[in-house]
Amino acid sequence: MRVFCVVLLVACGGKAPPSKAPVNALKNEKLTNEQLDEACTRKQIDPCLEIGERYWSADGVELDRSRASQYFKRACELGDQDGCAWYAGGIAQGYVAGEKPETAYAMFEKACAAGEQRGCRGIGYLKYEGRGTAKDIDGAEAVMTKACAAQDGGSCGLLAVILLNDRGNPEKARELAKRGCDLEASFACFVAAHLVSDDKETYRLLERACELGDAEACTTIGATLLAAPDVTHDGPKAIRLLERGCALGSERSCRALGGALLTGVEGVPADDKKAAKALVKSCDGGDLSGCAVLGVAYANGRGIAKDTAKAVSLFRRACDDGTTEATATGCYYLALSHTKGEGVAKSDTEAAKYFGLACERSWGEACAALADQYENGRGVKADKDKAAEYNWRACEMNFVASCMKDRKRP
C-alpha cells in the first residue's frame, strides 16, 4: 500500500469552470497576455482569471505562481469568489508574501459558501493539515466528500488520500481517485496510477496526470521511459514529458531533462544549451543533485561558460548538504577536482575523503577510485586489504572493472 504525502492542490487539480461571460465573444481567437492584462486592469474578471491560470500552469508563459496569485487577487477584489479561492490557494502555498494560512482559510470558507468547490477543497485540505485552523481529519473528510459529490475532481483525489492514509480503505480510495481523474483532476490521476495493479493502466494514468498538469507524474513517467526495462524505451516522448514537468516546476524533471540532454538519448541529440538551462532551474529550485550535474556542465563548459571554481562550489554544495545516493555525483566530482587540482587545491587526502563519501552513497566508480588510492598509498596509508574491500563494494555496485581485481567482502 502506498502512503501519499498530500501536496497542496487547493488552487489547482481540477478542470476550471467555464467563464461567466466570454472574454472575446466577437473573435474566436486566443487573446495575448498583453490584451488580458489590459482587460484585467479595466476591471474585467474573466481576463484576470485567464491570465492568472496561464501563469499558474505555465500555459504558453514561464511558470510564475506569485504573479498568477496577484491576478487572482484582482478577480477576487472585483467580487469573484472563484478568484478568491485561487488567491487563497496562492497564500496557502506561500506564493503571497505577508499573508497567513488563517487568511486563506477564511477566504476558502467564503468561496465555499458561495458554491465554489475550489474553496471547499481548500477548507478540507487545511483542516487535514491543521494549518490556519485546528487539525480535523473527520471534518476534512466530510467537506471533501460533499465537494467530490459536487463534481470537484481535486476533492475526490484528496479524499482518496485520506481513505488510503487514514482510513485503510484502498479499494474506496482507488474508486474515488479514478472518479477524480475522470473529472480531469491531475492529482487524482496521479493517485489512481499508484492504486492500480496493471502496468499499462498505471502508465496511462500517469500520462493523463501529466497532460493535466501534475509535474510529479511527468517526472515519473518521463524517467521511466528513459531507463526502465519493463516498458518500451522512447527517448523523444521521455524528453517531451520531462520538458513539461520542468515547465510545471518540478526540479527533478529539470534535472533529469538536463542530464539526458547533456548526453543525448536515442532519437534526441545532445543539446548543451537546453541542458544547462534546465539544470540551472533544477539547482535554483533546491535540487542538490541538479546542482551536481550543473557543476559538471560548468567544469566542461557544456552549454555554459566554463568555470571550474563555480563547478567546485556546486559539487561541494551537493556533497556537503546532501545525504542521498543521487548527491553522490557531487562528492565524486569534487574528489576528481582535488585529484586534478581544477578549481580547488590539489590534494589526494581530500580526494580520498570525497571518494569515500561518494562510495558510501553507492557510487561504484568512487569505491574503485578509493581502492586504487589504498592500493598505491595516495592520500591514505597503503592498505591492500582495504583496497580489496573497496573493490568488492565497487563490484557489488556493478562497476565491472573492479570485479576483475582482488577483492574481499567488507
Image (spheres, rainbow, N blue to C red):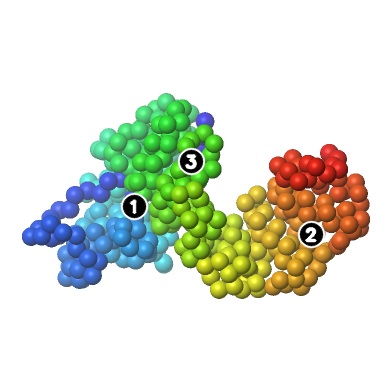
Residue at numbered disc 1: 11
Q: Are marks 3 and 2 in contact (CB under 8 Å)?
A: no
* CA–CA distance in space, label 3 to label 2: 38 Å
Q: Which residue type does callout 2 highlight?
A: Lys
Residue at numbered disc 3: 233
* CA–CA distance in space, label 1 to label 2: 46 Å
| Crowding at mark 2 (Cα within 10 Å: few <14, some 14-19, many 20+) | some
On the question of residue 162 being in view, the answer is no
Residue 353, disc: 2
Q: Which residue type does callout 1 highlight?
A: Ala
Q: Mark 1 against mark 2, which lies toward the viewer?
A: 2
* Residue nearest the viewer, comparing 341 with 326: 341
- Pointer 1 or 2: first along the chain: 1
Q: Which residue type does callout 3 highlight?
A: His
Residue 212, disc: none
At 30% from the left edge and 49% from the top edge, which residue is drawn? 119
Q: Count the marks: how many?
A: 3
At numbered mark 3, what does the secondary structure look like: helix, strand or loop? loop
